[in-house]
Amino acid sequence: MSTATSAPRFVRADGPDKVTGSGRYTADLTLTGALVAKFKYAEVSHARIVRLDVTAARAIPGVFAVLTQDDVPDVRFGPFVQDRTLFARDVVRFEGEILAAVAAVDVPTAQRALNAIVVEFAPLPVVNDIEEALAADSPLVHDEWSAYGAIDPLVRDRNDASFASIAKGDVDQGLAEADVVVHSRYVADGCHAAPIEPRAVVAQWEGNKVTIWTSTQVPFDARAGVCETLELPANRVRIIVPHLGGGFGGKCGFHYEAHVAALAKATKRPVRLVFSRREEFVAPDRRREGIVFDFQTGVLRDGTITARKVWLAIDNGAYTADAGFFSQLAAMHALGPYQVPNALAEAHLVYTNHQPSGSVRAPTAPQTCWALESHTDEVAAAIGMDPVEFRLKNAVATGKEGPSAQVYDEIGLVDCIRAATAGAGYGGDLADDEAIGVAIGWWPSFSVPSGAYVKIDGDGSGQIITGAQECGTGAVMTLRQLVADELGMQAEDFELVYQDTSVAPYDMGATGSQTLFNNGRAAVAAAGQIAEQLKQLAADHLEASPADIVLADGAASVAGTPSRSVPIVELAGIAAGGELLIGHGSGAPPAPPAVTGATCVGDVGMTAWVAPQFSCHAVRVKLDRDTGVARVLHVSTAHDSGTIINPIGATGQVEGGVLMGIGQALTEGTRYDDDGKQRNAALLEYKLQTCADAPPIDIHFVQINTPNAGPRGAKGLAEAPNVATAAAISNALAKLVGTPIRQLPMTAERVWTALNQEGGAA
Amino acid sequence: MSDPIGYTLHVNGVDYPVVAEQGRNLLSVIRTEIGLTGTKEGCDDCECGACMVLLDGQPVNSCSFLAAQAQGRSVTTVEGLQQGDEMHPLQRNILEAGGVQCGFCTPGMLLSATALLERNPSPTEEEVRIGLSGNLCRCTGYAKIVTAVQRTADELRH
């Protein structure tokens, strides 16, 4: 185990563009003749469309097009359940659903057109509560649910869009054998990714091909969505992402690229869409999902877990988007990184008339970790055991079996617990109004295909042409270092060509913390092909065997005879007149481990994880008991994300992820009115953490050799720091309040209420 | 919007003749009439600070400031921080400290920090944190940005 990082400090390649203002983001682009796009939204949560008349809007001078579902191919789409159309058809199911799209000469004209669209609705009952939606007599969000196409493993029933369960052993027997069974209920509100850049899309057709500049985290996914909904082949749709102003999952998936492309086609003009902050809150299908949890854990007096039984229901919102795998993923997180001999987790993904859910930084994990880890402290307290000792006894460890029967190879969770608690001074004296809470979390490394090319031109300068997407994390920036090291060159010798689907091979995008894990492997493979070419060229030049050639310090040398050497730039010149230096690689993703000891219903592959990441957070919190206001004073984190290749990027991910977690813990939660509409869709009412709120964060990296990790033993990192933060804060607050805060976010109002109710410590 | 009016804006040391509607905000005029897109729009409501510029050295959310009212005053945007090809020490330090991720908040953050160091060349960490609290960053957790500002203050004092 090592907690030090020896890698060189690293200045990101896109940095100068970003600090000088020369870097272009999508909303900075303009094209000659471009029109402005605006959307007409439902603004009601559930209604049948009685009348939608765009005639008057189309007649306004300066309005070039008004499109509805009648004007695009009638395609239902969705990666898990095909329950969505580009524009509303017959029924609207959440306030941000698009009825029509306008392209006009300027913003005021577009706004006039929106106002001129005539809409009449017949109200339908609003499904506003996750648990009520599962009742047999609940109104349906989708009357036609059973007619929708869906991927094979999904188990669906009425408002339940995806049921999943994980079962191991005999959970009822295990609970019966326990000395103590602790039963807890927790409720997490939904929240938002809230990137600072609102999304933007610009589309332009030339002949039968369309180019779309868009603020997406997943260019190839966006392309697939355009191809499916507008019925185009992939090679006629080019997605280009200028600099991306943050995403956090909010810009994953396919969103508005097809709407804008359809407007551009209809008007024969470039069309540009830029979202307002309110649209960013209300419209996209990428809200972090609210979840209701019910936990039972049985333990022996010595702290051994005998069984865990979990029921949970996730707010899917009105459409399924990419949330189809959330039920199984949440079931895994609800059982947790613990040795549980008898386990049953049942998870429902439930349609409501809320904005759709979708992948936001570690989807389902922070809320589920918050609930499970708060429950875990209750379990430890019930047998009078220190909660850290309880976790050290029960956490998954190398060679031990987890709740889905996966037996883990080299993992560092126990090391994480020791490092994080030591860094927090856990067990030491604290003021009366302070406490340290501890929580553990985990996250999979998604093993998926990914591609990259590398080329070196005749002057010895190189380019990495990658399908990977940079959303700010620096993961793509790190590719330069990996490629340069393979070739004995400098990172500065390489420029990156990225975020263009017509230029680079496929990658899943800035999602799932997978860029370095998969695309890093691809880039190294591509560089390896060039290394072989260079070694052959050098061998010919130096009259040696290729096997004896070493690439280092910008030169190819004969091993053991450094005087027999030729600069790589000279070899590049030779290659430019013959066989060009071109490499290509794809990730060759390792398969997940085979697991047979658990029964999984609705199995979408989320129960056996390649190279999982682990973390422990120990957080010191101060509570003002008069007001219920909590303040995080210090965070000590430890992460097993494998080898840390870029320390400055890695610590930046942890600092940012932890602060996002603090916001989720204390202030960030979406509130709905009785009609299912968001009440706080603005940054003044939905509070992000500011610079003045941010506590010091100590970071420890537990670096161990993990089988099937990415290049040099790296695993993912960007999502993991978000997982256990709210949970650790909850456990500190529970100590200070005397009872857990059972709702997330743990706002001052909720903390104050808990302090002043019966059983509180006030 | 009202009828266009003509006026001159002094931005980064250059006089720009502008013809724009009276109701246009400074952000919109800088980005679309003058063509400097380094200044970003994050909320159009004074909540995020991405649009921050300096007006006679004072930080202002340009989304909520009438462009015509900036006549006769000196506007600084992120493009005006560089001296020739040389980065401002804040730009260099925020890069080297790792205080830039997606970069969307960075221009506003840099201008807030510039104004802060102008009025307080030796800020404590707490003063830096309060000085930057009108600029939301979702990526970094702010730690490396604070480091960069403190490092710059040290450099500029020596």
Image (cartoon, grey):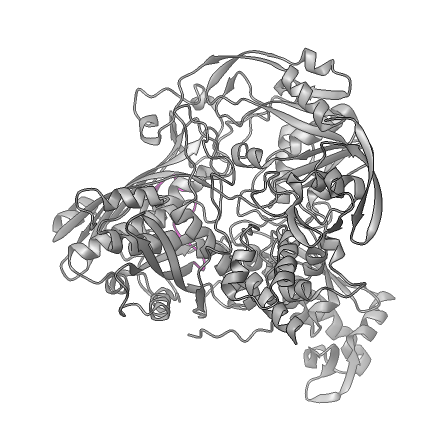
Is the magenta region chiefly helix, strand or loop? Answer: loop
**Residue B51 magenta:** no
Question: Which residues are the magenta region?
Answer: A600-612
Residue under the image location 88 percent in, 66 percent down: A577
* Residue A721 placement, left or right of A453: left
Residue under the image location 63 percent in, 26 percent down: A39
Q: Quadrant of residue A428?
A: bottom left
**Residue A601 magenta:** yes
Residue under the image location 81 percent in, 70 percent down: A572
Residue A732, given in percent of the width and then of the height, sits at 30, 56
* Residue A303 placement, left or right of A458: left
Q: Is residue A275 visible?
A: yes
Viewer-closest of A136 and A625: A625
Q: Is residue A403 visible?
A: no
Classify A67 as above or below B104.
above
Classify B133 as above or below B30.
below
Viewer-closest of A531 and A121: A121
| Quadrant housing the N terminus of chain A | bottom left
Residue A498, given in percent of the width and then of the height, sits at 69, 52
Residue A31, given in percent of the width and then of the height, sits at 80, 37
Residue A490, given in percent of the width and then of the height, sits at 70, 72
* Residue A706 placement, left or right of A172: right
